[in-house]
Amino acid sequence: MNIVQRLIPTKFKDTRSGIKLTPKYITIHETDNPGWGANAEAHARLQEGGNSREASWHLQVDDSQVIQSIPFNEVAWAAGDSDGPGNMSSIHIEICVNSDGDYKKAVKNTAEVTRQLMVQFNIPIANVVQHNHWMGKNCPRYLRSGEKGIRWNDFINLLTPPKETGKEGEEVLLKAGEKSETVKVLNYQLAALGYISWADRESDMFGNSTLSALKKFQKEQRIKETGVYDAATALQFAKILAIYYDRLKKNKMI
């Protein structure tokens, strides 16, 4: 997929951070702007002219083109987690949802450019995530709901075959003893939600502190206390993060 560069001028410090980024994730968003003509060109133009919001993203994709606004080695302000791992470790892609565009084709174009970036930066499929993953926001909304005829699982299937499942058919996501960037995000989120102190947070290791915090979460949420971050736990975690995100937004903290 050809990527057209239309970079935000460096003078717009609120949106062109200049902070060094080593990409470890790819985060998928939707513009949530169904207006006629709200395509990649329009969103690139918005960024070029200095967005009135302190928000920015690397790529905007519609049914015919991909436009880049920020270099892939610079941080964009898109995850809503300030200096957390969402902003500081991810490339952010916005799918255009303009009513005069072909949404399914835009999703397929996004999958194509995502595959390119996965290869370029050696990013595994497990690290291709929704905006919802970081702060619980309902984004990408249409992919999450499937109301436009294509769901998140369909998008992932465009990237790679489905993941293996556990003995009972449920996907085992994370467990004790693992060490990865995905575990690092889990520990950050457990700390943000108050299930582990920032001092005891174990960075990218799923150790005893992570295990204890996750079991505490499972107990409070009335989930079987396995200490494994499985599908059921991930679903409830997303719900709690959404509440947390709404509270931050209400208090104008993001």
Image (cartoon, grey):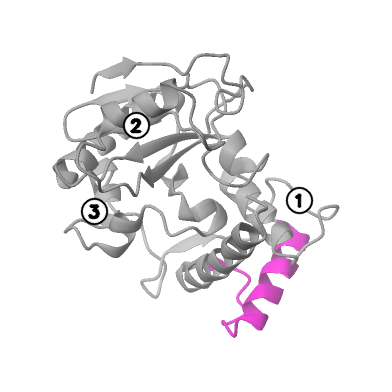
Residue lying at 57% horizontally and 25% vertically, measured from the top left: 22
Q: How many numbered marks appear? A: 3
Amino acid type, mark 1: Glu
Whether residue 218 appears in magenta in the rendering, the answer is: yes
Q: Is residue 217 above or below residue 75?
A: below
133 vs 228: above or below:
above
**Residue 117 visible in the current orientation:** no
Range covered by the magenta-colored residues: 207-229
Q: Label 1: which residue?
A: 202
Residue 126 left/right relative to 227 = left
Q: Dot 1, how many residues are within 10 Å of its Cα: few (below 14), some (14-19), or many (20+)?
A: many
Q: Secondary structure at mark 3?
A: helix
Q: What numbered label is drawn on residue 57?
A: none
Residue at 26% x, 38% y: name it.
Answer: 38
Q: Nearer the viewer, mark 2 or mark 3?
A: 2
Which residue occupies the foreground of this view, 123 or 72? 72
Residue 154's tag is: 3
What residue did someone put label 2 on?
Answer: 43
Mark 1 or mark 2: whose residue is earlier in sequence: 2
Spot occupied by residue 10 in the image (x, y as percentages of width and height): 55, 14
